[in-house]
Amino acid sequence: KQEVTQIPAALSVPEGENLVLNCSFTDSAIYNLQWFRQDPGKGLTSLLLIQSSQREQTSGRLNASLDKSSGRSTLYIAASQPGDSATYLCAVRASGGYNKLIFGAGTRLAVHP
Amino acid sequence: EAQVTQNPRYLITVTGKKLTVTCSQNMNHEYMSWYRQDPGLGLRQIYYSMNVEVTDKGDVPEGYKVSRKEKRNFPLILESPSPNQTSLYFCASSLFRESETQYFGPGTRLLVL
């Protein structure tokens, strides 16, 4: 059974720091992996989608990597800003899962000025 | 604007009183699903639908029903709500392709007394 774990559960950093959020999954048979952002009272916003054949994706200050063989993904946020404060969720789409996403519990990030 | 909408956004009810949470998308997506989010557990899939009149159970379907009579709508029905169904609910939709990202609604926060 696929399980997704995110470490750390919470993170507080000063503005300007580069930071790394970690995601691990137990079954390497995945179609893709997504990173989402969740703001309080709002839905999930997709940040980056990495297909199983890809190693990384970049969008602005965000870079996500995928190592399928080791069951790991990292989300790198460069030059963090207070507006980056949110909960970040990692989700894998398992093979044969009919678009079902399996989520980690999230990393709650606080960036203070 | 492409979006997934849910109503109501907030709901307080009592045990046993039937309720429906509506979900609608305007992107002509085949695939729709419902998730619930609970602290420390991440998001878990309740039900999904691959197209009109095609629905199936996710990981936590007990106590819920769904229907898919039209492509754009996918209501979640709680026929006899119980306190353990107090949660944050999300509807999601996507094209039915491996490479597609999923779009999430803003969430419905339900409290069952």
Image (tube, rainbow, N blue to C red):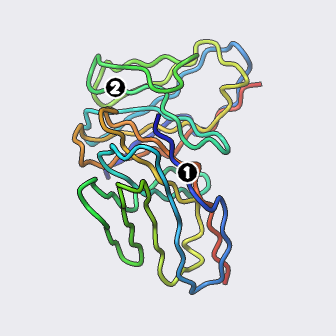
Q: Is residue B50 above or below residue A41?
A: above
Q: Are marks 2 and 1 in contact (CB under 8 Å)?
A: no
Residue B56 position in % (x across, y down): 38, 20
Report the quarter where the C terminus of chain B lies: top right
Residue A5 position in % (x across, y down): 55, 51
Query: Mark 2 = which residue?
Result: B49
Q: Residue furthest right?
A: B113
Specify whether disc 2 shares its chain with disc 1.
no
Q: Is residue B85 above or below residue A61?
A: above
Query: Mark 1 = which residue?
Result: A5
Residue A93 position in % (x across, y down): 36, 43
Q: Chain of mark 2?
A: B
Query: Which tag is nearer the camera, tag 2 or tag 1?
Result: 1
Q: Is residue A34 above or below residue A22?
A: above
Q: Which residue is painted at 36% across and 60% down in the image?
A: A67
**Crowd around label 2: few <14 · some 14–19 · many ≥20 (10 Å):** many
Instruction: Report helix, strand or loop for mark 1.
Output: strand
Q: In the picture, residue B29 is in which quadrant?
A: top left
Q: In the picture, residue B28 is in which quadrant?
A: top left
Q: Residue furthest bottom?
A: A16
Q: In the picture, residue B60 is in which quadrant?
A: top right
Q: Nearer the viewer, residue A37 or A100?
A: A100
User: Mark 1 is on which residue type?
Assistant: Thr
> Label 2 vs label 1: CA separation?
27 Å
**Crowd around label 1: few <14 · some 14–19 · many ≥20 (10 Å):** many
Q: Residue furthest front?
A: A70
Q: Nearer the viewer, residue B23 or B60?
A: B60
Q: Which residue is painted at 66% across and 18% down in the image?
A: B81
Q: What label sits on residue A20 in the rendered view? A: none
Instruction: Report helix, strand or loop for mark 2.
Output: strand
Q: Which residue is painted at 34% across and 20% down in the image?
A: B68
User: Mark 2 is on which residue type?
Assistant: Ser
